[in-house]
Image: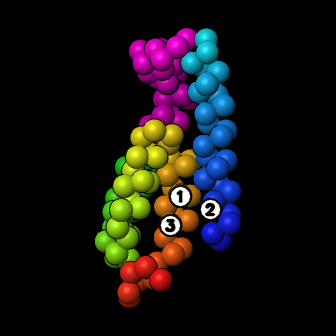
């Protein structure tokens, strides 16, 4: 599973950033335009709201699992990756990190 999570982390960085870089090349870092396009119609709003709820659930899950498994500093890397890349990196990265821990003694 570790290999799958690592591959998903890489794909979760490369694919979304491919489209983000295309946007930046055309519009620059125009936050207002990003927000406008994110909520331009019902279907894009559906995906945006779904994403934000999923991010919230991931944060709760990550901190709960980190506490339960005694995962230390690595959880902060996942939180930073959530806000700089997205859930497509943060979730598989956390699952990759979590593979190194068990519930009784912390890091294996």
What span is colored magenta in the figure? 27-53
**Figure check: 89 above or below 38:** below
Q: Is 71 left, or right, of 94 in this rendering?
A: left
Using the rendered image of the protein, determine whether residue 76 is visible from the camera's viewpoint.
yes
**Residue 53, image x, y percentages:** 41, 46
**Figure check: 103 above or below 21:** below
The residue located at (61%, 33%) in the rendering is 17
**Residue 75, image x, y percentages:** 39, 60
Asked whether disc 1 touches disc 3, contact meaning CB atoms under 8 Å apart, the reply is: yes
Please, what secondary structure does the residue beneath circle 1 have? helix
Q: Nearer the viewer, residue 48 or 43?
A: 48
Using the rendered image of the protein, determine whether residue 57 is visible from the camera's viewpoint.
no
The residue located at (55%, 11%) in the rendering is 27
Asked whether disc 2 touches disc 1, contact meaning CB atoms under 8 Å apart, the reply is: yes
Asked whether disc 3 touches disc 2, contact meaning CB atoms under 8 Å apart, the reply is: no
The residue located at (50%, 42%) in the rendering is 86
Q: What residue would you read off at disc 1? A: 93
Q: Which of pointers 3 and 2 lies earlier in the amino acid sequence?
A: 2
Q: Does the segment drawn in magenta span residue 30?
A: yes
Graded by Cα atoms within 10 Å as few (under 14), some (14 to 19) or many (20 or more), the crowding at tag 3 reads: some
Q: What residue would you read off at disc 2? A: 5
Q: What residue would you read off at disc 3? A: 97
């Amino acid at each position: 599973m570790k290999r799958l999570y690592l591959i998903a982390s890489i794909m979760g960085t490369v694919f979304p950033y491919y489209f983000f870089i295309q946007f930046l090349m055309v519009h620059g870092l125009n936050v207002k335009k990003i927000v406008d396009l994110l909520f331009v119609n019902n279907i894009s709003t559906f995906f945006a709201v779904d994403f934000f709820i999923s991010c919230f659930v991931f944060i709760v899950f990550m901190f709960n699992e980190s506490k339960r498994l005694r995962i230390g500093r690595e959880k902060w890397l996942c939180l930073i990756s959530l806000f700089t890349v997205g859930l497509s990196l943060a979730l598989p990265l956390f699952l990759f990190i979590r593979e190194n821990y068990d519930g009784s003694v912390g890091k294996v």
